[in-house]
Every structure is written in structure tokens, then in C-alpha cells.
Image: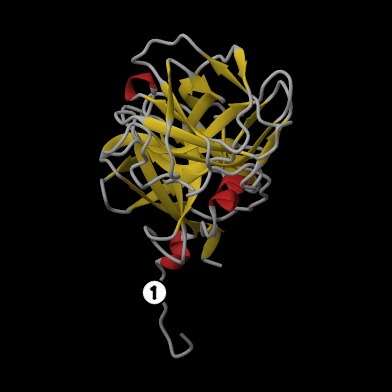
Amino acid sequence: MAKLELDYMEYANDAAAQDAYVSSDTARSTIFSQALDADGGAYKNYTVRAVIPAGSLGVDANEVRVTIEAGSVENLLVEKSYIGHQGAGENYDFDGNQVQLLYNASASVDIPVGTSVASDVVTFALDNTKDLIVEMYIADNAAKDTFRRVVGLPATFIHCYVLGDKAGETTPAGTWTEHITTIFGVNKIEGMIALQSYSENTIIQQGTYSLKAVAAQTDSLNDTLTKSGLSIDLSDKEEIKLYIRANRTGTNIIQTRFYDSVGGWITKDISTTSGSFVEVTCDISGIANANKSNITKIEFKILNADSDTTYYIDNIYAQDVALDNAIFFGINF
């Protein structure tokens, strides 16, 4: 058999891609963090919007999660919540591109007294040069309408707006009441893991999907994406090939790695050309069969994190070069 497929990268969704290629980085970047030190209650059936100015936001992100904190005396029942950038109208207006937050795939969340709950990770293009709004609809339940807050912040730092009417979803009608130097409920907003894998169905080399790897500037250096639990015999195979594309041109900026249970790591540093798939060849002809007969891991390691980089990886296979290049003669071929 001349060609042995190692991974077609056919992962149909982000969850499948992340289950397959696990990031070594588990910590998310902090976009916003604020300790809350007092209770704010009697907000049943209210819409609450916290406006966080750009100067208080840490980093850009393509995905976010928001942590909301209940009060110290009762639960907080949030029916719906949204995150979005401030629009051109009033300070509390969204720009129209807001995204709904979910909690274990549910729109509502009942946060136990004295605790915080983080939303699911949602796709949202957060620009840290734009003011940010987090909105919560508080349920019509007087026993679950208290959240933690903090007051006395600098006037230029944050504003919070409340409206005693949830009608209208993200464009509720009515008169907003402004609370200057206050934030209600939101104690943290987190962004991306420094290196994460995703499913990609547009930029592909073959098939329907490729693996997209998003690497953050600086923080992704030496991070890895690893597929484990394999048992692949590369005996008599002479080379491993794969295809990789990036949004920047660079020399030796990412490394592909294959781990054999006896022989250890087989590595190849990869250079990229912006906007084009590059065919990568890893020569394994000089490695004894005993040292490549049980490949248990496939891994990608970031060698250069000078800028935010997106990689697309597809179609990893091994082959016997001699057999592939053979020329056959005779009527039987």
C-alpha cells in the first residue's frame, strides 16, 4: 500500500475539532475583570445594560464568555442576555451586531446566591477599540432579582442603564435610568484561548473540511495542538506529507510532530506563504521501522508568535516514495 492516510481533518464542527486536537493552553485571555462588592436588588422584570468603555477592555477576541454574579441574599434569574458593541445613538444602544449569550445551551440561567456563572463560549468579534455593552433581562421573580454590583468607579470608566420593561428584546422601549460609576452583575469577560482548533469548511485542500488553528500573538508561543490515542504503523513508509496555509508568510513558524512510543518525536519545522496551501514533506526514510511502527500522537507546535496567526491544516498522509515513483512495463500493468 503506497499511501496511508493519517488524518483527512474532516471535523464537521468546532467541538469535534477541539476534541480531536486538544490545546495545551486552557487559560482564556482576560478582556475585562472587576470585583463586585455590594448587592443591587428589586430589579425583577428589568432590562439592565452595562456599558464598558474601550479603555477598560484588554484584548481583541473572536469568541467570548461572560461571567455574571448573583447577590449575597438570593438567587439571580436571568431570562436572556446579550453582548455587543455600542452603536451610534444613545450610550446604551447596540450597533445591531449583538450576540445572545447562552448557559449550557439555554437562554436563561438561575445563578445561585453568592456565586458566579460563566456563559457558554460564543462567537463574537470583539474590538477593544469600541465600547462594549452587556445586557441582561431579569426575570419577573421578586425572590430572584438581586445581583452583585460595585459603585464609586471613575465616571469615565463605566455606566449602567436600567429599564423597567423587558419588551422589545434588544431594542426595548421606554425610559432608561442611568447609574453613573456603577456596574451590575458582570464581573468578568474572557476571550480566546491562546491556541485553539476549529472546524473550517471554506478554506480546504481536499474533502469538505480542514482544521483551523488560531494562535494569539505572544501568548501562543510553544503551545501545542495534540491528537492522542493513535496507533499508526509507518513501517516502510518513507515520508509524511501534509498541507498547511496561513494568513501570513513566515519561516519556521510552526512545527508538525509525530510521536512514536519507541522512537520518540519526529519533527518538521514549517514555513508558510500567506494565502496559499504549502505542501510539507517530512522525510522519515532514515528512521528504522522499530522507531516509527507505533505513532500515538500527531501534534502542531507554535514556534513563532510575533503576530496573531490563523493556520489551515489538511490531508496528512504517509507514503512509500519508491512505490509511488515506480514505472511499470508490460501488458499486465
Q: Nearer the viewer, residue 216 or 283?
A: 216
Q: Nearer the viewer, residue 149 or 300?
A: 149
Residue drawn at x 70%, y 32% as measured from the top left: 142
Give the percent coordinates (x, y) of residue 126. 38, 36
Q: Nearer the viewer, residue 250 or 87?
A: 87
The answer to whether one can see residue 36 in this image is yes
Against 244, residue 248 (above or below) is above
Left or right: where 18 falls relative to 204: right
Left or right: where 83 falls relative to 116: left
- In the current view of this chain or complex, which residue is farthest to the bottom? 331
**Splitting the image into 4 quarters, where does residue 203 fall?**
bottom left
Give the percent coordinates (x, y) of residue 290. 64, 44
Judging by the rendered image, the residue that carries numbered circle 1 is 327
Left or right: where 75 falls relative to 69: right
Give the percent coordinates (x, y) of residue 266. 52, 39
Residue type of the residue flagged with mark 1: Ile
Residue drawn at x 26%, y 50% as measured from the top left: 275
Give the percent coordinates (x, y) of residue 158. 40, 20
Q: How crowded is mark 1: few (under 14 residues within 10 Å), some or many (20 or more)?
A: few
Q: Which image quarter holds the N terminus?
A: bottom right
